[in-house]
Image (spheres, grey):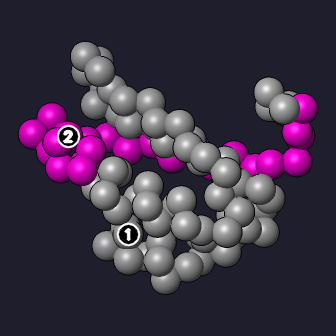
Amino acid sequence: MEDSTGRTDYVTQIISRRVKPERQAEYETWLKERLMPALAGFDGYEGVTILRPGETPSREYVIIQRWADYDRLCVWAGSDLRREVLA
């Protein structure tokens, strides 16, 4: 797939999470204060798109992360920082 700059060599990771309505504010805080800062400082991270559930009954968040390449995504996936953020 080609992005708006014409690049085709990046990797995309898609994560889906269902969040209980009463926990959405807490999840939003976690996204803003824990996940986003951790990703932003990680080598190879190129951006994220978060699709929020809105008024749908699914309560599903979809997090789409873009990485410079597969190897850097794998480093993130196996990192202590990722484990800390998800704990």
Q: Please provide percent x and percent y for residue 52.
A: 37, 30
As drawn, the label of residue 24 is 2
Q: CA distance from mark 1 to mark 2?
A: 17 Å
Q: Residue at x 37, y 67 (%)?
A: 86
Q: Callout 1: helix, strand or loop?
A: helix
Q: Please provide percent x and percent y for residue 28.
A: 27, 44
Q: In the figure, 83 relative to 70: above or below?
A: below
Q: Residue at x 78, y 69 (%)?
A: 71
User: Is residue 20 something that shows in the picture?
Assistant: no
Residue under pointer 1: 85
Question: Is 87 on the left-hand or right-hand side of 66?
Answer: left
Q: In the figure, 78 relative to 10: above or below?
A: below
User: Is residue 22 something that shows in the picture?
Assistant: yes
Residue lying at the far bottom in this picture: please name it.
80
> Magenta residues?
6-29
Q: Residues within 10 Å of mark 2 (few under 14, many from 20)?
A: some
Q: Please provide percent x and percent y for residue 4.
A: 80, 27
Count the labels in the image. 2
Q: Any magenta on residue 24?
A: yes
To which quarter of the image does residue 44 belong?
A: bottom right
Q: In the figure, 71 relative to 61: above or below?
A: below
Q: Residue at x 34, y 51 (%)?
A: 31
The amino acid type found where label 1 is placed reads Val
Q: Callout 2: helix, strand or loop?
A: helix
